[in-house]
Structures are given as structure tokens and as C-alpha cells.
Amino acid sequence: MKLLVTGATGKLGTKIVEALLKSVPANELAVSVRNPEKAEAFRSRGVDVRLGDFDRPETLDTAFAGIDRLLIISTDGDNETRVRQHSNAVAAAERAGVRFIAYTSLANARESKLFLAPVHKATEEAIVKTGIPYSFLRNNWYLENEISSIQAVLAGAPWVTSAGSGKVGWALQQDYAEAAAAVLAGNGHDNTIYELSGSLLTQEELASAIGAVLGKEVPVQQVDDAAYSDIMKGAGVPDYILPFLVEIQKGIREGTLEIESNDFEKLLGRPATSVRDAITPLVNGISQSK
């Protein structure tokens, strides 16, 4: 049985490979990466490192050859680019005769109104169309996405948001990684959808948890989208990222990430790490990086 993880040198991909190496012999594990030299640490441990570029489908034919179970980690970029890249990967998997595809999707991908959802809806549909058994790992939101806001709080700023009372199922990348590894290396996951979400919290509840860890009150500043954009711009966020951040806040406000689920427990045998427990290592990491 040969397993392959795409995008294995990214933050999530690296964590998934490390999780797999705890349960799968290295010689049964392959990774597909754009820059194989960046995966040298995996190669030195016996992992099969392959060149695979989602913009060069011919490299994917070679990368996916002889693979039984494939994990496609969604790429970065604008929606059009991502749909094209994911389509290339799915088509290559079909050509290679892959027998199972897991895919890192988005919460409630088929019905979600979040601006990121069309990419994941299209990719899920493309995978289903192949007839290959699949598992869709619908990740809610990474707690690590809030590191810059936590940094601002550490510097004395309030928690700024335009998300209103919308709730999010934040969880650590490590939990998402372990769930993905469990599906890729496990059995009984054919044609499944897992809504992977931590406990649902509002921005105020998240700020309160951060305050509890820091031992101080974290004031929350609720603003409208325009003010949020201005504040983020003033904090040094590049102009091209501002619309993305505003749309995320809008999506949260409209409830697009308010998906309740115990699927983490199904896959990990435990709930996702509580936000309060998860914040501590993030704060320590920020402090150490100063």
C-alpha cells in the first residue's frame, strides 16, 4: 500500500506527514512537492519524494504513479487558479489509477456562501465524478490564522473584528493534520464527509480565552467592514490581502463557519484541543520568535 500527500512541505502538509510517520513505514509513504529539495528531510528518513506541480500536469502523472491512497491538500491562490490546479490533480489521479482520494475541503463546502467555497465545491464534484472512493475533510478554521491578531493583543491592542456574533469552530492545524493522517492511513473511510470543527465560539469568547491565558482582559472592538479594513491597513496588512480578510469577517458574521460536529472525536478518539489549551503554545511560540 503506497500513500501520497501533496503539498507536503507546507505548514499543514508537514504536520500530516509527521503524523503519518508515526503509524506508517516510511517506505510506504510518498510526497509530491514543487521543490523536492525542500523535502530533503523527509527523503533522508526514507520517504519517497516526488516532483509534482499542479500547474504542470505531466509531473503529476509521474508523481501519482503506483499510488493507492492520495491526499490532495488544497492549494493557495485566487479561486480560478485553485480550481484549475485541483482539476489537474484530480484528473492525474484518475489517469494514474489511484484507488482513494482524500481532500482538504472547507466547512459545509457544497452549500456555503463563503467566498472560498466555490473552489472546494468544484473540487469535491470533480472527485465524485471520477467514481474513485473519496473522503472530504471539511476543515473549519485554523486557530493559527489568528496569530497576527494575538500578536497585536500581546502588544496592547484590542481584539478588532467585524464578525459580529458569528461563531467559528477554530482548531489547531495539528488536530486537522492528525485527522487527515487517520483517514489516509485508515480503513472504512470510503465516500465519507467529515465536518472537522472545534467548539463553536464567538470573537468575544475567543478573546476571553486569550485573556485567560495571558492573565489580562482583552477588550473587543466590534467595527464595520470598512473600519476593519482601515484598521488592518494601518496595522501594516498589504492592500491585496485586505479584501480577503474583510470577506472572512463577513462570512463569519453570516454564519458560514458555524458548523457543529463531533467528527474530530470520530477520527482522533478525542475532541479537538480546546481553544484555551491551544492558545498557550501559540502565545509561547510568538514570544520565542521575538
Image (cartoon, grey):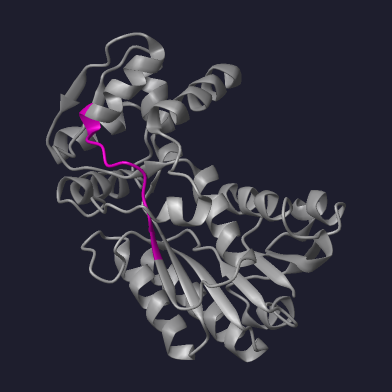
Instruction: From the top left corner, tell me how far across and down residue 106 is, in percent.
Output: 37, 60
- Tell me what residue is drawn at x 75 percent, y 65 percent: 29
- In the depicted structure, whether residue 165 falls above or below residue 157: below
- Tell me what residue is drawn at x 74 percent, y 75 percent: 1
- Which of 21/161 is in front? 21
- Which of 121/26 is in front? 26
Which residues, given as a range, are shown in magenta?
A: 194-204
- In the depicted structure, whether residue 16 falls above or below residue 168: below
- Tell me what residue is drawn at x 52 percent, y 51 percent: 268
| Left or right side of 278 for 55 | right
Instruction: From the top left corner, tell me how far across and down residue 86 is, in percent.
Output: 49, 74
Instruction: From the top left corner, tell me how far across and down residue 284 is, in percent.
Output: 54, 20
- In the depicted structure, whether residue 61 falls above or below residue 220: below
- Tell me what residue is drawn at x 57 percent, y 51 percent: 178
Query: Quarter of the image containing the C terminus?
Result: top right
97 drawn magenta: no
Quarter-of-image position of residue 239: top left
201 drawn magenta: yes
